[in-house]
Image: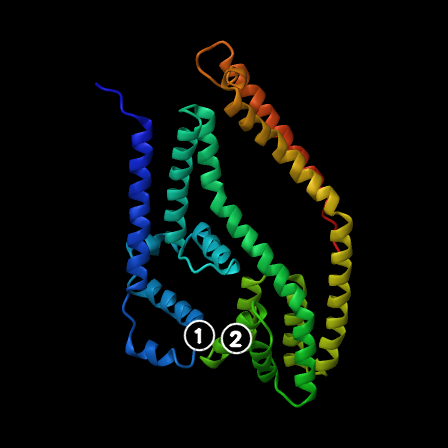
Amino acid sequence: MANINPMLILVVGGGVAFLLLVVGVVLTYRSSRSLVEERLDKYLGEETLQAIEEERKKKRSEGWVDRRLSKTTWWDKISTDLARADLRLKPMEYILLRIALTIVGAALGYAVGGGTILFTLTGLVLGYFGLGMFVRFRQRRRLNQFNSQLSDMLNLMVNGLRAGYSTLQALEAVSRELPPPISTEFRRVVQEVQIGIPLDQALDNLLRRIPSDDLDLVITAINIQREVGGNLADILETISSTIRERVRLKGEIRVLTSQVRFSGTALAVMPIILFFIIYRINPDYMGQMVHPDNPSLTPVGYCIIATGLILIAIGYFVMQKIADIEV
């Protein structure tokens, strides 16, 4: 039996995965919308309508796989991560895209490394974890943007409450006046209340999308005021001062620890980059550890590389932990 070229298998597999991804995206965006949803679109945002559509599909028209997987914690975590990153992807589309990137990364590693196992595995790992790293990066950036706008949001809300607005009207003013992402999130809260969802539940949904400690403090104050009464404007003004001071301290700490964080990242990335550069410049020199021409040295070389990667990872996480100071 003739040997099958591994490169051909990777290319064919990547093409099939990409085709499935394209088909899923096309079917999603060409799904029919009812007349009621088209009328609601005049008053509700696209995000709220997507939430309604997802709930309706869970009860009626989802496939067998979606109905089974939607009940699992893993599926729910993917949905939460995509919502926190503000990515308009469904969990199944995310999974298909991750599979396609894994296969493409392995194929590129195989092509760049001349068929060596090390480069193929490196491309596979980067392709698999790359999308997850991008999602976490989007989550952190969006959370930081939200926290930086929270004090302005509280000031605007305090002024609205003192001018005679209700809590919902003050939240609606926030959704109109401030820039994204805070305006987008509070517009979703207002839209959920308008379609009949209680305010406390809408705020809990907001906290699930934006896992911020400062936002948790604000929501707790609003819920307590609605239950026992009190001057909400004065409470929010005090919270705003506290949050503003915390943001200032976080900025100072981030500046003081930036050198440690940059050093940790540079020291972790530099050996890996130098290894691949030297391998491409002089394959015979670095290839003694990974090339199968010398079976007696190949296992030792892989052990050396694995030990080096473990030590690099430990050093990186230790330096990042040193720079991570809670306020």
Q: Is residue 12 above or below residue 119?
A: below
Q: Quadrant of residue 58?
A: bottom left
Give the colour scheme shown. Answer: rainbow
> Which residue has dot 1 on it?
45
Q: Which residue is drawn at 46% across and 28% down?
A: 119
Q: Position of residue 280 (x, y in %)?
A: 50, 25
Q: Where is residue 315 in the image (x, y as percent from the top left)?
A: 68, 34
> Which residue has dot 2 on it?
187
Q: In which quarter of the image is residue 113?
A: top left
Q: What element carries label 2?
A: helix
Q: In this view, does 36 lie above or below 79?
A: below
Apparent side of residue 318 relative to residue 91 in the rendered image (left or right): right
Cα–Cα gap, marks 1 and 2: 8 Å
The residue carrying pointer 1 sits among few (fewer than 14), some (14 to 19) or many (20 or more) residues within 10 Å by Cα, namely some
Q: What element carries label 1?
A: loop
Can see residue 219? yes
Instruction: Locate the C terminus by quadrant.
Output: bottom right
Can see residue 216? no
Q: Which of marks 1 and 2 is nearer the N terminus?
A: 1
Q: Which residue is drawn at 56% across and 74% down?
A: 200
Q: In which quarter of the image is residue 245?
A: bottom right
Q: Tell which residue pokes out farthest to the bottom in this image.
A: 164
Apparent side of residue 134 relative to residue 92 in the rendered image (left or right): right
Relative to the observer, which residue lies in front, 99 or 69? 99
Q: What residue type is labelled 1?
A: Gly
